[in-house]
Image: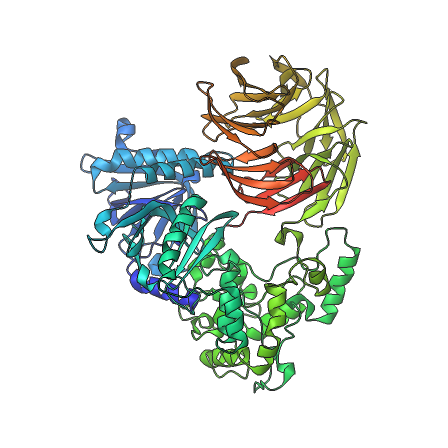
Amino acid sequence: MAFIRKRRLERELYSKERFSLLLLNLEEYYFEQHTANHIKNKGCRDERKFRGSLKICSKSIIFEPDDNIQPIIKIPLRDCISIKAPEDNEAKNPFTQDTSGGISVVCNQVFLIKERNIIAPYKTVRGRTEHLFQLDVAGKLGDVVQTLHQLYRASCLDKMGDQAAMITAILQSRLARTSFDKNRFQSISETLHMECKAEMVTPLVTNPGHVCVTDANLYFQPLNGYPKPVVQITLQNVRRIYKRRHGLMPVGLEVFCTENDLCSDIYLKFYNYQDRDELYFLIATYIENHITEHTAESYMLQWQRGHISNYQYLLHLNNLADRSCNDLSQYPVFPWIIADYSSSVLDLTKPETFRDLSKPIGALNKERLDRLLTRYEEMPEPKFMYGSHYSSPGYVLFYLVRVAPEYMLCLQNGKFDHADRTFNSLAETWKNCLDGATDFKELIPEFYENDSSFLVNSLKLDLGKRQGGKMVDDVELPPWASGPDDFLRKSREALESQYVSEHLHEWIDIIFGYKQKGSEAVAAHNVFHPLTYEGGVDLNRAITGIAVTCNGSSVFTTSQDSTLKMFSKESKKVQRSVSFSNMALSSCLILPGDTTVISSSWDNHIYFYSIAFGRQQDILMGHDDAVSKICWRDGRLYSASWDSTVKVWHCAHGETLSSKKHHFELLAELEHEVSVNTINLNTANTILVSGTKEGTISVWDVTTATALHQLSCHSGTVFDAAFSPDSRHLLSTGEDCCFKVIDVQTGMVISSVNTDEPQRCFKWDGNTILSGSQSGELLIWDLLGGKVTERLKGHTGAIMSMWMNEQCNSVITGGEDKQIVFWKLQY
């Protein structure tokens, strides 16, 4: 049941509503709603009003008409041209005096969803259109427009990380202005133990609000009041509670009121691990007084003695392995058991009926495995046998598309998959897992439960037409199954059969046990793509700089052996190695367009390398000593040097992306008293920070080339410095094992955090810090608490450089141990 049962309960509870949080983009928040009219053809003879609800979200405006025939309208904020209230432009006011509370939204693109209340791919309407919305409560107009303008500004920021940071700031401000409504307590005699901010997590969605724990109940109150004003769980009913990792952070908590079920009652994500741990302690203490705690060992003993079924044991193993039905990236995984999908009768007494449980999916077909092993032997380190994984959000929804179509549309930007790639047939899917070059997926628990609805197209979804003209409908079952229910019954019998009971431990060793990594994984042919793990790539050099092309296909590194290397991110093969001089290269970056790489060198020069032509393109001889760091913003190059200067250069427009020689114009020279080690700019490119070898931090107005502040912050070399997304604060780290937070306006140090060892580089969103340490660990910091929340081992030497993508979910680090390490941040 699990996922399917939860979806059915939600549909029954909110059957009157067409809107759901799945209509939002991934990692988008729903803030508020207002009763309103959508006015079409204003001022014309065929003017019409459609009553409904206007919903304000962090990346879009959504209007849900009361009339189910009319489509839901979704307007992405990034596609808006203007958002105005009548008073914004009275001369051209599209509203008359009887339409107070009106908002005009002009945009380039809108999406039409659930027209006639039919779940189908979104219809896209491109071209300039105007939408007029009239609020019922005109007094709220000013606040709504102000909020929309604020969110629109966030959507216009170039970098996804900056957008996320600004939206997070808006969200936290809203949460700070509200608190849990104590009138929602079930009884006035309840004693409050704890209240904090958190988000309720469901597949592909997080919903912010407030958590409250009393002596009798756990409550969650969504900030937006959706899907209901408060979620209540009676502590007396709680049977299990698990700490979860949400992304890289230990901030998740999942609560179950059932003993043998994968469907939890609530999954919460907190904003810091202290709140999570405190709430866990409160609930766990209550449970200990009522229920016996079960450990992994106790579950194993129960299973070995036959007290719990194979299904129940796998259920508990998935829970203990941090897998949850609320997280599609860590959804519970169950094995393919049956290998016979062609016989008219399923014989569970014959071993050949079953899949070999001692091998991963990719090793079941010897011919395919031989091809993969040949490629594996020829592959440079790090080697891998399988380029895809056995579980992913796409695989989960591949199986569940017929009961969870809105999830598939959410994951795939409003579209279903191609008809021939849809889950059409058990036999076809099993054959593809055996023979396909890239298909190594296992099953999900729904195949061993008693709800067969995921095999039937009961919603009459239009999932497309296959080659040959056949429409996608119900899943085709094997001949030995008389129907969907019979198929599940026989699948459960197979899972609990004597053969599986005798061999299931072999599959458990591969998925959950000692054969996951290392030599045992190699021996078991169980080695997946390096990005599946937290793995490294050996470039045989100490790494000083990392740059990645916009499409993510190529990675460039600089190192102290004076070489610029380019390698394919997919194959991990070095494609080019270029040496510019006999001295170290200190940093690198890629110009817009992915055609030119710039590298700075200790030989005082800056080198331009053409990716397209594979040759050195130009040289800038701009300094009298080593160039330590370079930045590029809006056609300007900023270079820091040990000659005690930071120089600002202009490159002639149009020539930076070609093979022609560059024309450089020195615009400004920022003088320092000692060698400059690092520089960085704010998001508006108006303020620059520089850090010296003697610990001085300088803040510069680059528009006037004047120093705003010069501070002696560190007692040794400044390794890295960066502005917060809103440019109000500055963070620096140095040789003296300290993080310093500086108020940019006043120049005052407002916070100092001591570290156990130097942090050579970092990424910062204004709150959380991701830093590379001297010992090679990737550390995650709670800046407000001044503590490390997680330590991730990646290098055997200092982490010297760090790159993060705009979505903030992929990180590459380079270290003294001659490796670059790929980190996947999972949400």
Residue 793 position, x and y percent, is 62, 45
Residue 262 appears left or right of 347: left
Residue 659 visible? The answer is no
Residue 596 position, x and y percent, is 68, 32
Residue 695 visible? The answer is yes
Residue drawn 48% across and 72% down?
Answer: 312
> Is 118 located above or below residue 94 in the figure?
below
> Is 783 located above or below residue 283 in the figure?
above
Residue drawn 69% across and 39% down?
Answer: 797
Residue 92 position, x and y percent, is 29, 29
**Residue reaching furthest front?**
289
Residue 750, quarter of picture: top left
Residue 698, quarter of picture: top right
Residue 587, quarter of picture: top right
Residue 343 appears left or right of 462: right
Q: Nearer the viewer, residue 464 or 256?
A: 256
